Image (spheres, rainbow, N blue to C red):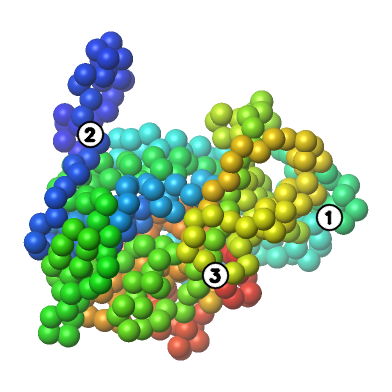
């Protein structure tokens, strides 16, 4: 970060006393150059984090990030902000724990307030069998340094006294807590990475949609965009739910499907939720924002779609799950709803590897794990692009695992929500 770009309390005071006359754009809105070493398609969290770590860790700065809209206007700003590393399988847990470690130092790293709050998350237990499964998960988390606490019914009551503990269908018997989990401001994460990458020389090109690919000698040689052709030695895709739309232009299909995932927000309330929690007998998860709003979500919509809007049956399902846990929930007013596009893989785990076409690199299929994976995704994808080989943390996220049978099936239910 250049010294004149660093934020500080003194700059805040100066800007406040001078009507912000000294404020400058957080990043350069670049004009496309004819050629780059690397073009990253997608200006969301994963694309921006990849560009930043390519420049910071690998010293590669002749990079363009092309975004069809504006920075932070896609899936990055359409999630429920939860960060965690409470996974079970050996292929997933170390990756997400590295992401958690990067989250913990991200504000200092980027010199940007991304509002990380490590207030914890509790996965509720409703049966003896579920307790056994969560004991196993907690042990895996502890072995990987993530930390975990198995909570009794009374322990949960101390944290979340407003829940319906004696619900006839879904009695609460305990919970699994990760105290280091929490939330972060979703769009601020993208802006922070964009500002830091731009300061290192990365070109950020907005309102530049990729419509096709350039080829030369049997390999991808760049992209065709609405702002002209951009040639590149390496082309990396980090476009979340739109990945399959772009790869279809290359003549191959990915083992993923795109679904809409809705999120909801209520009117502001006095603070009463510390951290986040999830419903263990249904699909509902909830936290409270700094403004007092309840931020919650649930299942994906039940059909494939690229629309950033949801349907009413899922709204009903999410509210039913919430009402089963929180008796007063139906009495609240709900302010708004939004939706992002999830690319769901067949085993519920991501794809991050050198692509099947020379010159192509894939970052896709994040299911429910996309936002929380942002720092580690950028770190590992940058390594994969720079060195043409996977980082040890994403070596199992190969696309050919679906052909060889080496699946990373966190829940055993295929292309379904991968939350708990």
Q: Nearer the viewer, residue 16 or 34?
A: 34
Query: Is 392 situated left or right of 213 in this image?
Result: right
Disc 1: which residue: 170
| Gap between marks 2 and 3 measured at Cα | 38 Å
Q: CA distance from mark 3 to mark 1?
A: 30 Å
Residue 405 position, x and y percent, is 50, 87
Residue at 40 percent across and 66 percent down: it is 242
In the image, residue 230 lies at what x, y percent? 15, 64
Q: Is residue 410 above or below residue 154?
A: below
Residue 120 horizontal side relative to residue 2, left or right? right
Residue assigned mark 3: 304
User: Marks 1/2: CA distance?
Assistant: 51 Å
Viewer-side residue, 226 vs 49: 226
Is residue 286 toward the left or the right of residue 98 in the image? right
Q: Work out whether residue 342 or residue 288 is closer to the camera in this orientation and state it.
A: 342
Which disc, if any, is residue 25? Answer: 2
> Earlier along the polypeptide chain: callout 3 or callout 1?
1
* Classed neighbour count for the residue bearing mark 1: other residues with Cα under 10 Å, few (<14), some (14–19), many (≥20): some
Residue 137: quadrant of the picture: bottom right
Q: For the point 61% across and 34% down, which residue is it?
A: 293
Res. 120 visible in picture: no
**Residue depicted at x 36% and y 38%:** 107
Q: What crowding class fits label 3: few (fewer than 14 Cα within 10 Å), some (14-19), or many (20 or more)?
A: some
Q: Position of residue 357 (x, y in %)?
A: 26, 81
């Amino acid at each position: 970060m250049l010294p004149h770009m660093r934020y500080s309390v003194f700059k805040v005071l100066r800007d406040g006393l001078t009507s912000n006359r000294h404020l400058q754009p957080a990043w350069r809105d670049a004009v496309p150059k004819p050629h780059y070493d690397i073009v990253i398609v997608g200006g969301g969290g994963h694309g921006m984090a990849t560009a930043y770590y390519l420049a910071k860790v690998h010293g590669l700065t002749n990079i363009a990030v092309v975004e069809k809209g504006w920075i932070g206007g896609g899936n990055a700003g359409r999630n429920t902000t939860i960060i965690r590393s409470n996974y079970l399988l050996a292929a997933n847990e170390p990756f997400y724990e590295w992401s958690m470690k990067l989250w913990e130092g991200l504000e200092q790293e980027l010199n940007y307030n991304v509002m990380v709050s490590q207030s914890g998350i509790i996965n509720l237990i409703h049966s003896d069998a579920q307790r056994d499964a969560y004991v196993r998960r907690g042990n895996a988390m502890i072995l990987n340094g993530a930390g975990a606490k198995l909570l009794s019914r009374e322990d949960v009551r101390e944290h979340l006294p407003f829940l319906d503990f004696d619900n006839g269908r879904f009695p609460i018997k305990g919970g699994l807590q990760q105290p280091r989990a929490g939330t972060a401001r979703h769009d601020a994460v993208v802006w922070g990475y964009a500002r830091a990458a731009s300061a290192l020389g990365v070109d950020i090109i907005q309102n530049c949609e990729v419509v096709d690919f350039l080829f030369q000698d049997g390999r991808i040689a760049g992209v065709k965009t609405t702002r002209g052709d951009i040639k590149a030695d390496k082309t990396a895709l980090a476009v979340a739910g739109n990945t399959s739309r772009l790869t279809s232009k290359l003549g191959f299909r990915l083992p993923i499907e795109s679904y809409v995932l809705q999120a909801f927000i209520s009117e502001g309330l006095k603070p009463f939720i510390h951290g986040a929690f999830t419903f263990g007998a249904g699909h509902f998860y909830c936290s409270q924002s700094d403004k007092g709003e309840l931020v919650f979500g649930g299942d994906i919509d039940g059909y494939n779609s690229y629309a950033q809007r949801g349907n009413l049956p899922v709204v009903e399902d999410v509210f039913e799950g919430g009402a089963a846990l929180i008796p007063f929930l139906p009495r609240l007013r709900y302010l708004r709803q939004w939706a992002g596009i999830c690319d769901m893989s067949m085993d519920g785990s991501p794809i991050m590897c050198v692509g099947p076409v020379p010159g192509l690199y894939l970052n896709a299929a994040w299911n429910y794990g996309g936002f929380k994976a942002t720092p580690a995704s950028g770190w590992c994808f940058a390594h994969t692009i720079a060195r043409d080989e996977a980082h040890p943390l994403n070596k199992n996220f190969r696309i050919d695992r679906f052909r060889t049978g080496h699946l990373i099936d966190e829940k055993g239910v295929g292309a379904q929500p991968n939350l708990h």
